Amino acid sequence: MKRRDAIRMVPLSMAGLAAAARRVSGQEPDWGKRWPEGREPLAVEYSRKVRERLAWIRENQTENLMEAAYAIAQTVEAGGQCYQVSWDAGHTEADSWPGRNGEPEILSTRFDPNKAKKGDLLITSGQTPQTAELKQKGVCIVGCTSPWSGDARHAELLRDEVKLLTLRPYADIYIENQATTLGGVVTVPGMPAPVGPVSGITGKTTLWMMLADASRILARKGIKRPVRGDEPEVTGKTVDYKSFTEWADLRKPLMDDYYLAVMNQLEMVFAEYGAIRKIASLAAETSLRGGMIWGYSRYNSIAGEASTRRSGLSITQGIYGSQLDTPEKRKNMPGSPKDCVIMGITKPDDEVDLAFLDLFRERGMKVVSLGPTTRSTAIPEGRTVPKETDLHVGRMCDTYGLFAIPGFIRRICPTSGVVLDHLWWVTMMETVQQYIEKSGGDVPGVYLSAALKGGREHMHRMLLNYRDR
């Protein structure tokens, strides 16, 4: 994608988008008398702080990200193995799973420290017992700051044994991302910790930025890599995918184009603010009536974000596709008509997602969804999750990747994982706001990091309190 194409996509300001969303809904949001005058909505505040964090990373860490991209490409060219383990991409290790659309086969998550050798490369965000040994072996280590480490800001809040875990001294290339040990970025009166984590968005974005240019560098050398997913292969002299019709220019960096596309799509989330508010209203009312807010994803994305997440909410719980992969498990699946489920998808017509949608309907649960509605900007024929759920948000992103690169059979670097993470937390922040309004001032429980002093005890209290309630 050309930089000028990405720039043309940049929409109105956040304020303009929010105002446009309000006009579409036909009414101004009523934040109630209890909300501090002049404070922006929590969803807007959260999104603004996420984008500010990404802008800081782009401004201050681009050279390190590019150096990492070259290190990845050089490792592949020399016949070494590139591993990605525990890169902080949210309450999961990566934006990667079997058949992930747009993922070039460059990084392996099957890491055995005993088999790693000189000339290999490891992308990680946490110190392990093998870190020093890997360094001595000559494994190139690309690291970033994790909230679960002494590298993060406010390390004094960590348990002593966690505080000692630092990756920065061992890393050959280090990506600073301004992570704090608390994780969240929005402070709400009555909550014991900031709410709204950002590491899922920053981690996924930086990982795809590195992979974009590593792939470009390999392609310049004529090195081909398979690409996962079910997108038709790109062939011929041009690539017909509507908005962008050219092969990527291998002479120019791609990570900045990926960043611009992500920032554009994160801002466009608020073009669907009306639907977000309706989903949040449903979630808040479900919780206040004693029901559970379930977060579903086939793989470990939204399901992980909904489960005891640092700076996350105790009123949510995850459902993983892998938890229900047998008839017996599905028979015993939790859920009732008093509950609601928010489905997180990365393609609209996934057969497993549709099967779970049917299962949720059988349970009588209210079902809404987040994620892309299209493949190559076109809505698939037949059944899709967005067509059949009660509410859906996700028109700003697509199933497939952004860049068509010679020698890579499918487009690479999707934005769906980044946007889905953002959509979940924007919706949760709006849920917090509506929970406060609907309850007359109460706040939902928020989890502290278990790495903090007293964090584990607090997590158990939150679980017990919600169970009792």
Image (cartoon, rainbow, N blue to C red):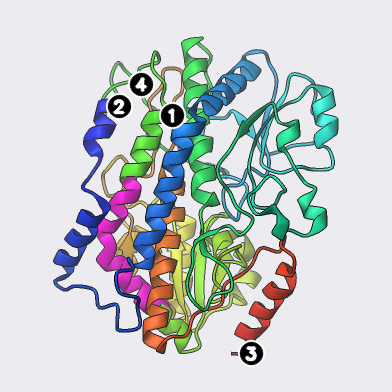
The answer to if 355 sits in the magenta stretch is no
First reached walking from the N terminus: tag 1 or tag 4 = 4
Prevalent SS, magenta region: helix
First reached walking from the N terminus: tag 4 or tag 2 = 2
The segment highlighted magenta reads: 265-283
* Element type at mark 1: helix
Classed neighbour count for the residue bearing mark 1: other residues with Cα under 10 Å, few (<14), some (14–19), many (≥20): many
First reached walking from the N terminus: tag 3 or tag 4 = 4
Q: Residue at the spot x=71%, y=62% of the render?
A: 452
Question: In the drawing, does residue 164 fall left or right of residue 121?
Answer: right
**Image position of 333 with respect to 164: above or below:** below
* Element type at mark 4: loop
Residue placed under numbered mark 3 in the picture = 468
- Image quarter for residue 322? bottom right
Question: In the drawing, does residue 368 fall left or right of residue 138?
Answer: left
Classed neighbour count for the residue bearing mark 3: other residues with Cα under 10 Å, few (<14), some (14–19), many (≥20): few
Q: Amino acid at mark 3?
A: Asp
From the viewer's perspective, is the residue at label 3 or at label 4 nearer?
3
Residue placed under numbered mark 1 in the picture = 255
Marks 1 and 4, how far apart in space?
Answer: 12 Å
Q: Are marks 2 and 1 in contact (CB under 8 Å)?
A: no
Residue placed under numbered mark 4 in the picture = 248
* Element type at mark 2: helix
Q: Residue at the spot x=50%, y=84% of the render?
A: 291
Marks 2 and 1, how far apart in space?
Answer: 10 Å
* Element type at mark 3: helix
Q: Are marks 2 and 3 in contact (CB under 8 Å)?
A: no
Marks 1 and 3, how far apart in space?
Answer: 48 Å
Q: Quadrant of the C terminus?
A: bottom right
Residue 3, disc: 2
First reached walking from the N terminus: tag 1 or tag 3 = 1
